[in-house]
Amino acid sequence: MNKELRRISIVALAMFLALFVSTSVIQVFQVDELRADGRNSRTLFDTYSAERGPILVDGVAIAESKAVDTQYEFLRTYTQPELYAAITGYFTLNQGNTGIEGELNEFLSGTANEQFLDQLGALVTGQSPQGAAVELTIDPVIQQAAWDALGDQQGAVVALDPATGDILAMVSKPSYDPNRLAAHDTSAVLAAYEELINNPDDPLVNRAIAGDLYFPGSVFKVLMSAAAIDSGEFTPESTFPNPPQLQLPNSSSVISNSEGGACGGGETVTIATALRLSCNIPFAQLGLALGEETIAEYAEAFGFGTSVEIPMEATPSTFPTGLDDAQLMLSSFGQYDVRVTPLQIAMISAAIANGGNLMQPTLVDSIIAPDLSIIREDDPVLLSQPISRETATTMTQLMVQGVANGAASNARIEGVDVAGKTGTAENGGDAPYTLWFTGFAPANDPQAAIAVVVEDGGGFGQSAFGNRVAAPIAKQVLEAVLNR
Amino acid sequence: MPPTSPEGAAATQASPEPTFTRSIAITVRQPSKLRNLELVLLLVALGIGGTALALVQLGVNGELDPGVLWQASALGMLALGMHVALRIVARDADPFILPIATTLNALGIAMIYRIDLARGDSGWESLGIRQMVWTAIAMVIALAVIVVIRNHRVLARYRYIAMLAGIVLLLLPMLPGIGLTLNGARLWIQLGSFTFQPGEIAKIALAIFFAGYLVTARDSLSLVGRRVLGLQLPRARDLGPILIIWVAAMAVLIFQRDLGTSLLYFGLFIVMIYVSTGRLSWVLIGLGLFLGGAAVASRTLTYVEGRFAAWLDSFNPEVYDAQGGSYQLVQGLFGMAQGGLVGTGLGQGRPTITPLAESDYIITALGEELGLVGLFAILGLYLLFVARGFRIGFNGTDDFGRLLAVGLSFVVVLQVFVVVGGVTRVIPLTGLTTPFLAAGGSALVANWIIAALLLRLSDEVRHQPRLVVDE
């Protein structure tokens, strides 16, 4: 009987072991997954009844939880709602969270694994846990300047510190008031949400990273030139034939330069001149000479095709594949099917400004626990080295020429060398142009790289160029950078 | 096997004699040591219970309610009374069983009471108050069992009465007029406002019957029969009892719609027949029969099918939203995840979001507020409880007592495994009560009787060390 008993004991022990394992799996390994499940109302109650950490800009809260006398205990309040909406996102009862509120929800609500000891402490002392504060990289002066400079235009401005990847300003217009969505009156929140989501101008979309991707138009020529020079096959003085019009191979389409006529006169034209004057035909020929593969390689090195997390996920920019010659030539000046985010364009300028080193863009400076200890502080991360230092230096000189004596003249700042490039992208048919500027300043010691996009032709339909609308906006923002 | 042990009797009777050797003097002094150990453990158990109750009040209401604490301390006195009774009528009984049962029962009361507070129930509506009253009844009955049954061998004589009682109790809920269906299972009887689940008591009666029957019948069950493929197969007529139990288990499954209880009876029988006969063929035949029946049931009975779907595909929105789907199961998992490693603290979580958090899902409620640490402690207590029962099986003086102890212990194992395994997705969810913890008077009475019987059985083990010779 004892032999059987021993076996039965082992069976009983195995049954208990199964329970020890199953409870451990649920309460340790599946915790994050279960808490994140949309059907988990406990998480919802928790996020509301805990004191959510603030979002700080230069130490000042732009989003904070204020104690109120309702069942939810705290009301999320945004002090400069529209200015920062693209960054903070919103925090709602049941429509999800976006922006920093969504991406760093665990830290803000105090449920991140890094805050485990705090949770334990709160449990022992019986106090409700407190969320961590998120300090942003945003410079409030530059952010305000970008907001003001963009005025009533639809579009976006992104300014980066090229050396660190820190995002100094990120504006998307039209904006919205996240306070309307953070309210505790569910029906009012739903009504506001319905209104915003159905607004044809898409105020809820952060155009800097996640809007419908834009055609880059001529700002793509910066990447083309950098690729050509860095490949070693071309120098800024390499020349191309300079016809006033060019029929695309195997196609009836004819392309011309934006100013009409040949590019700056002469039988041939250099890459330097073509970039300075933003001519299409030489770049179409350059694209054909470089080949789809080389361009795609450089585009990828500059960040195309990957989604950077700032920590919000930016939509990957795309360079098309499988192009015939005509499509390749159109793509070479940023048309056909090249699609970008303003952040991607700013990253191209930032890489050039930083000696060819592309830094990971980020909005988060640090995450600070309620007891002021630092939970997370990210060191600058090198994302890639798309071009050599020499190429970067050459490109800087070319882009300075573009502002000093070229097509980007409206970005000139007295006493400072500004490197820049404008863009005027066609959207097909009669659709208004998309107007661009990208660049950095000062050219010899870059403090900020910038991308400006203005939709809808800046209100001028097909009659305005990037230099007229986007360059002055960039100029104002860069001046704010230089004056700080 | 002799019915009594001569050396043990001599030792206890002769203890005052000065001529006895030192070693015997030590064994004779042990009983009071055992009871002292029990007293210390019991005081710890009562401390845990009282603290849990106070924390629940502070956690939910932010203030203490002395009334309930006084009522609870009356239960504590009852537990101490049981300890005193053991000092008199079962001095050598196992010192761990009573404190473990008390701790689990107290934790259960605290959690059920905590759920009452969250729901705002009070008075007789309050399940916590009812649980306390039932605890008192159960403990008194357990006390009576220990005092009245001085020699467990008496029980073997009543094995066929026990069988009859077990079957009658099992079938009672199917009688029209008094049968009552709750949550889809026809397991209750109702007399006036009084409801009872007779199946809970039936499992003890059946364990007594199995033990008595198997001790006398095991030779014919184990020695006769043909060998096929290395397995000793039983004779067809010896298959009779296992078939009867199979039919009974299937009847419970089909007519009372209760997967857990049928699993419990069947598992109990298989384990006991295996231990008594040592024939693996019985286990295989039994498992084959049960799994076959269950497989057929899962295809033909929609509620069983639904349970399987909820088990395998819990997070599928369709299963989640289905009638009788996985909503409750998933809410329980959410609760446990909320608790994580250390729990939210008593009274600080939201266990009431999970339906039936006071009964079937009390483990998830405890997991939410006490965390994985708390659940490990609770599972550890069950494991220790069962180990003490198995110890009687190893060291008992007579085969009936050993078999009964193993059977009763395995009833606890099966219940814990089926309930906890069910809510943690080890197996499909079936309705059984978590011993001592879950709300429910019948289960409390049954489990306290099990504790009382184990105490009684263990009383005879300690008398003398037994030389174990395995066959």
Image (tube, rainbow, N blue to C red):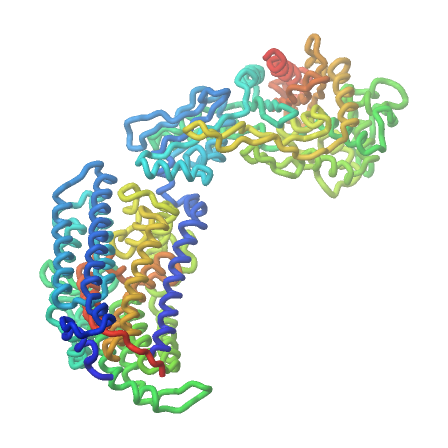
Residue B426 vs A333, above or below: the answer is: below
Q: Residue B430: percent from the left, percent from the top?
A: 32, 63
Horizontally, residue B319 falls left or right of residue A266, namely left
Horizontally, residue B97 falls left or right of residue B141, namely right
Q: Residue A126: percent from the left, percent from the top?
A: 30, 36
**Residue closer to the observer: B427 or A124:** A124
Q: Residue A467: percent from the left, percent from the top?
A: 69, 17
Residue A9 vs B84, above or below: the answer is: below
Horizontally, residue A53 falls left or right of residue B167, namely right
The quarter of the picture where residue B55 lies is top left
Q: Among all residues in the image, which is located at the extreme top?
A: A414
Q: Among all residues in the image, which is located at the extreme left?
A: B192
**Residue closer to the observer: B17 or B230:** B17
How many numbered badges does the structure rendering display? Answer: 0
Q: Residue at x 19, y 61 (%)?
A: B35
Q: Residue A164: percent from the left, percent from the top?
A: 62, 27
Q: Among all residues in the image, which is located at the extreme front?
A: B19
Residue B322 vs A72, above or below: the answer is: below
**Residue closer to the observer: B324 or B269:** B269
- The answer to whether residue A430 of the structure is visible from this angle is yes
The quarter of the picture where residue A224 lies is top right
Quarter containing the N terminus of chain A: bottom left
**Residue closer to the observer: B222 or B350:** B222
Quarter containing the C terminus of chain A: top right
- The answer to whether residue A194 of the structure is visible from this angle is no
Q: Residue at x 38, y 53 (%)?
A: B320
Q: Residue at x 86, y 18 (%)?
A: A265
Horizontally, residue B298 falls left or right of residue A164, namely left
